[in-house]
Amino acid sequence: MRLLVITPHLLPDTAPTGVVVSAIVDHLGGLGHEVHVVTSLPWYADHRIVDGWRGRPFRRGRHDAATVVRLHPFPTDKSNLAARALGFIGFTGLATMAGLTARGPFDGVIAVSPPLTLGLAGWLVARRHRCPLVCNVQDVFPDVAIQVGAITSPRAIRFFRVLERFAYRRSDAVTVLSDDMAANVAAKVATGSPGGDHQVASHTRRSLVRVIPNFVDIDAIGPGDRDTNYRVEHDLGDRIVVMYAGNLGHSQALDLLVGAARRHHHRHDLVYVVNGGGVRADELREAAADLENLVVVGYQPADRVPEVLATADVHVVLLKAGLGASSVPSKTYSAMAVGRPLIASIDEGTEVARVLHGAGAGLAVPPDDLDAFVAAVERLADDPELRAAMGSAGRRWVEEWRSPASVGAAYAGLLEELAERRATPRRKC
């Protein structure tokens, strides 16, 4: 098949979405499919186009076997929502033009959301090339933005709700990362049928909501020695490292880390490390200035990720209350792959909590509950045998879980299924 992928990020961009989509593209190519990608110039880490990629509004190149068109992303300060919205609109306009003018024919289009506007771009491009559209939903937007208070205007909320339903209903299929997200998306457009696949009726076509989880590359990320160069660089010594690695945004309950560090200021054997970037990075750096046991480090190059993850003795996932059905933090599986236990502050009964409980790979505590979070940290910090057992259990779980190759095959199989549906005339009722 010839496939067209529209995504906001692709390696070497450091965004988690870019890592995931890059692996899917690689394995689709490995299966013999011809892939063309429309994406942005690398910009995620510092919200500016990185050195070596500036000077031209677009570039053509390759990623592994795929051909790639990289476009200007109109980067701006993440805290300026109006400017970010305009940036997404500008990038979506360029991506739409690049997709419409791409040399076909194509057998399928995959559009990655957020931003939701790429769902609209995907629909126009799929219509132009007369092929099925798969909308890949990494986070359910605008749910997350509304719940954290990033969007409060009733008019803006109505607009994004309309755009969300438009994108889902005009897709031949919507892929999500968990059953929680599947139920969420299915409820947005119609009543879903029970089971792993949710059939969703729309006025244009029958859309399929299917769970295809993200993955972790267990060959690239595996158990490693905790005594890393990263420990030396940041003067962590032999202390027990409790690490949050990822985006520092409004969705993450990062106040828990600051509160726990304050509670544990007397424990010289324990240090909290935040590795990442985002709108709350400056706030955390200010807090760290008064706390010797809180260290804040910026995003690291992709080739250092395994080392950074191996440095930790305990990893944490911090998702604010109400977001567990809208987002599945990919850092969960990376922590498990590196053989470290995980503490997840997350809604009870949602995907991450279920995985940790089923695998025996960590502890899930109620979201935004500092006492419960501190108690979980102390339990693992004071029990090295429990840390080792949970870390090993998590590694075993990811080894049996979906691989990048199986996820690529799942997308290829879905697109083949959708092409067959289009080729088969429907019977009249």
Image: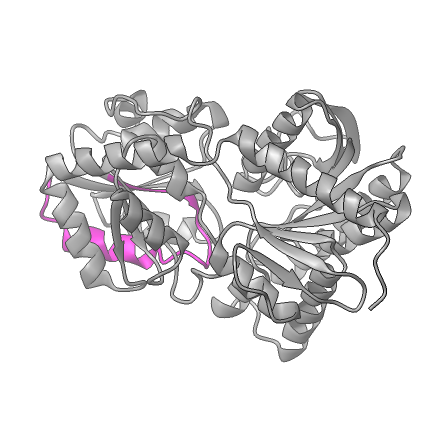
**109 falls in the magenta region:** no
Query: Considering depth in this image, is 404 or 273 the residue closer to the camera?
Result: 404
Query: Considering depth in this image, is 396 or 325 the residue closer to the camera?
Result: 396
At a point 18% along the width and 35% down the height, the residue shown is: 389
Give the side of residue 103 with respect to residue 400, left or right: right
Q: Residue 205 placed where, x, y %?
A: 78, 61
Give the side of residue 290 with respect to residue 172, left or right: left
Q: Residue 345 placed where, x, y %?
A: 31, 56
Q: Residue 201 placed where, x, y %?
A: 71, 67
Give the side of residue 424 with respect to residue 25, left or right: right
**247 falls in the magenta region:** yes
At a point 34% along the width and 36% down the height, the residue shown is: 397
Query: Considering depth in this image, is 348 or 415 the residue closer to the camera?
Result: 415
Quadrant housing the C terminus: bottom right
At a point 36% along the width and 58% down the height, the residue shown is: 253
Is residue 95 something one can see in this rendering? yes
Task: Write down the region rendered in magenta.
Answer: 242-268
Quadrant housing the N terminus: top right
Query: Considering depth in this image, is 211 or 375 the residue closer to the camera?
Result: 211
At a point 54% along the width and 69% down the height, the residue shown is: 146
Q: Residue 124 placed where, x, y %?
A: 84, 52
